[in-house]
Amino acid sequence: MNHLYFDQEEFTGKDYTQNTLEKGVYENCTFINCTFTGSDLSEVEFEECEFENCDLSMAKLSNTSLKDTLFKNSKLMGLHFENCNQFLFSPQFINCILDHSVFYTVNLKNVRFNDCRLHHVDFTQAQATGTSFENCDMKNAAFEDTDLKKADLRTAKNLILDPDTNHIKKAKFSVESALNLLNKYDIKIS
């Protein structure tokens, strides 16, 4: 299959729900106010791209590459990031809604989640060493055998995780979120 190459192009206000984004390599491209809801982004490579005010909810990400790609003010609900090409996987998320998305076994080392809503997101067995969850709402996010070493969770809200089933050495917590680590023991702290 012949893939197209796009460099430093801007795509504004495009609707890719009916006419799918062309398969290819998108380098240094910007997508503004675009809709990808339910679109098939399989085999597409995004390198140093930026998505702003876009809706990618329920998009298919089979072997999709996200290299140094920024998502800003966007909806990414129900995405299966574990299906992405994991080679140089390095997205960043600012003020995004990622509810019901899955990062199962994904390498999230040093990924930034800033001001994001992460309700019911699955981080099971993810490698989140050094990951920042700044001002993120993590209601019902799932952590099981997740590597959170050196992760910054100081300003994360609604965070509940079990320190016995996750790796949290040198992770940073606020006093409130550190107390939440004790929830499973059903103890009273005053």
Image (cartoon, rainbow, N blue to C red):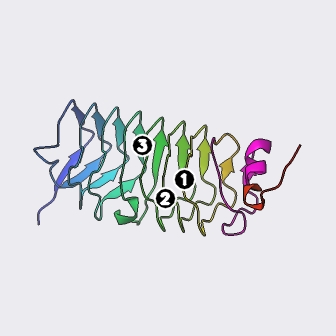
What amino acid is found at the position of numbered circle 2 in the picture? Asp
| In the image, residue 176 lies in the stretch drawn in magenta | yes
Residue where numbered disc 3 is placed: 70
Residue at point 66%, 54% (across, down): 151
Residue where numbered disc 1 is placed: 141
What amino acid is found at the position of numbered circle 3 in the picture? Leu
* Image spot of residue 127 (x, y percent): 56, 65
Q: Which residues are magenta?
A: 157-181
Q: Which mark is residue 97?
A: none
- Say whether disc 2 or disc 1 marks the residue closer to the N-terminus: 2
Report the residue that reaches farthest toward the right: 190
| Residue 30 sits in quarter | top left
Residue at point 50%, 46% (across, down): 118
95 relative to 53 in the view: left or right:
right
Residue where numbered disc 2 is placed: 122
Secondary structure, mark 3, is strand
Spatial distance from mark 1 to mark 3, Cα to Cα? 22 Å
Front residue of 100/154: it is 100
Residue at point 34%, 39% (across, down): 51
